[in-house]
Image (cartoon, grey):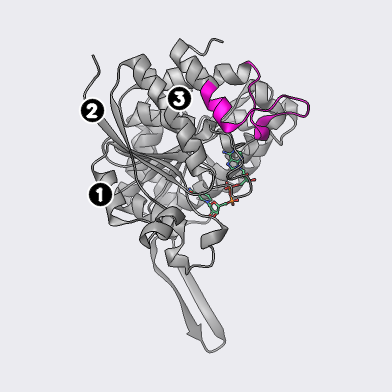
Amino acid sequence: MAEKMNRIAVLAGDGIGPEVMGATLQVAKEVEKRHGLAVEWKEGLVGGAAIDAKGKALPEETVELCRSAKAVLFGSVGGPKWETLPPNEQPERAALLPLRKIFGLYANLRPAVLYPELVGCSPLRPDRVAGGFDVLVVRELTGGLYFGQPKETTKTAKGERSVDTMVYETHEIERVTEVAFRAAAFRKKRVTLADKANVLETSLLWRKVVKQVAAKHPNITLDFMYADNAAMQLVRDPGRFDVLLCENLFGDMLSDEAAAVAGSLGMLPSASLGEGSFGLYEPAGGSAPDIAGKGIANPIAQILSLALLFEMSLGQPEAAQTIRHAVAGAIRDGWRTADIAASGEKKVGTQEMAKEIARRVALGTGKS
Ligand code: NAD
C-alpha cells in the first residue's frame, strides 16, 4: 500500500536542466515502486524558460506550486540567451535568490564526493586522493556580505565609492551550525569552521557561537581553520575534512573548490534547507550551455539531489540509500558519461546512464 501523497515541485529550468530532470524522474519512479511511496511530481516554469513563456524568471504560479509542495527539485537556470537582460532580471538572480529568500533557505549542503574509481577525474595528484574522499561543505546562505546593508555605490569627488557589509547575528550562526553538527553526527563526526578570525569581527562571533553549539554535541570534534588555509588544505589533502562549515562568502568559494577537486560538476548534488523539512535540491553545476541539447550531460548530480530530497524532505533515508547504492554500483561497473570517462573508456549518454541507475534501483542494492 502506497504511503500518503507527497507533492514535489519540479523546476527543470534551462540548458541541460530539462534533459537531466527527465532522466532523473525515471529513477524517481523506480524508487517509488521499490519503496512503496506515492509522490506527485508537478512541473513548473523557472528561469529563462519562464521569462520566455511568462515574462519573468519566477512567475507567481511557480512560487505557489513551491508553497504547495514538500520540496523543490530544481534543475538549473540561465544561458547566453538571457545574459543581456538587466542584472536584476537575469535567471539566477531573479529566480534562485528570491526562492531562497521566500522559503528562508539559510543552509546550503554540498557533498563533494570523489569515488575511488574516479580518482583519475580529480585534478589532484592520485596519491593525494587515493581511495577518494567525502567532504560536506555547509554554507550559510542568507546572510553575510551578499545581503548586509549598506550595499551601494556612491559618487565621490574623486570617482566612486562602493561598500558591501558583512553582518551576522547570533541566531543566524546558531541555526546553520546546528545543521552542520546534525549532519556530522551521521558522518565522521568532525566539524571544521573556516573563518578569518585573525582579521574579521564577524568571524570572532562565529567562533564564539559555534563553540556554544558544539558544547551541546559532545560526541562531535570541532576545530577552526582560517579560510585561506582551508582553501590550501582542500587541494593538499581533501580527505582531512569531514564537515566544513562556512559563512556565505567563504562557503561560496570553498564549496566550488571542493567540487573542482572532486572532478566533475556533473556528479555533485546540493540541498538548501530552512526551518522544518522543506528544501530545495539542485545540482551544484549550472545549465552547461556548452553541452545542452546533446544528450551527453551527466545526470548523476541531479539524481543524487533526488536522493537528498528523499532523505531530508520526505524522511525516506532508505530510498536515498537505494539511489546512492545504484549510482555507486553503476560507477563501480564502469558506466561513464563523457565528463567522467578516462581516455579509451566507453561513454554513455544522459538517458543510458539514468536507465542503468533506474535498473539498479529496481534491483535494490546497486548490484549489476
Ligand atoms: P556550468 O556549471 O553550467 O558549466 C561549467 C562546466 O561544467 C561546463 O563545461 C559544463 O559543460 C560542465 N558541466 C556542468 N554540469 C555538467 C553535467 N551535469 N554533466 C557534464 N558536464 C557538466 O557553469 P557556467 O558555464 O559558469 O554557467 C552556465 C550558465 O549556468 C550561466 O548562465 C550561469 O549563470 C548558470 N548557472 C546556473 C546555476 C543554477 O541554476 N544554480 C548555477 C551556476 C551557473
Mark before the other along the chain sequence, 2 or 3: 2
Q: Secondary structure at mark 1?
A: helix
Q: Nearer the viewer, mark 1 or mark 3?
A: 1
Look at the numbered disc 2 and say if its residue's Cβ is closer than 8 Å to ligand 1: no
Q: Which residue is mark 3?
A: 189
User: Three-letter amino acid code at disc 3?
Assistant: Lys
Q: Which residue is mark 2?
A: 5
Q: Is residue 329 above or below residue 120?
A: above
Mark before the other along the chain sequence, 1 or 3: 1
Res 182 seen here: yes
Q: From which residue to which does the magenta span run?
A: 333-355
- Residue 128 inside the magenta-drawn segment: no
Residue neighbourhood size for the residue with mark 3, other residues' Cα within 10 Å, grouped as few (<14), some (14–19), many (≥20): some
Where residue 272 sits in the image (x, y, percent)?
39, 41
Q: Nearer the viewer, residue 324 or 119?
A: 324
Residue shown at 63% from the left, 48% from the top: 290
Q: What is the CA distance from the residue labelled 1 to the residue labelled 3? A: 38 Å
Q: Is residue 149 left or right of residue 133?
A: left
Q: Is residue 109 above or below residue 64?
A: above
Residue shown at 45% from the left, 24% from the top: 189
Q: What is the CA distance from the residue labelled 2 to the residue labelled 1? A: 18 Å
What quarter of the picture does the N terminus occupy? top left
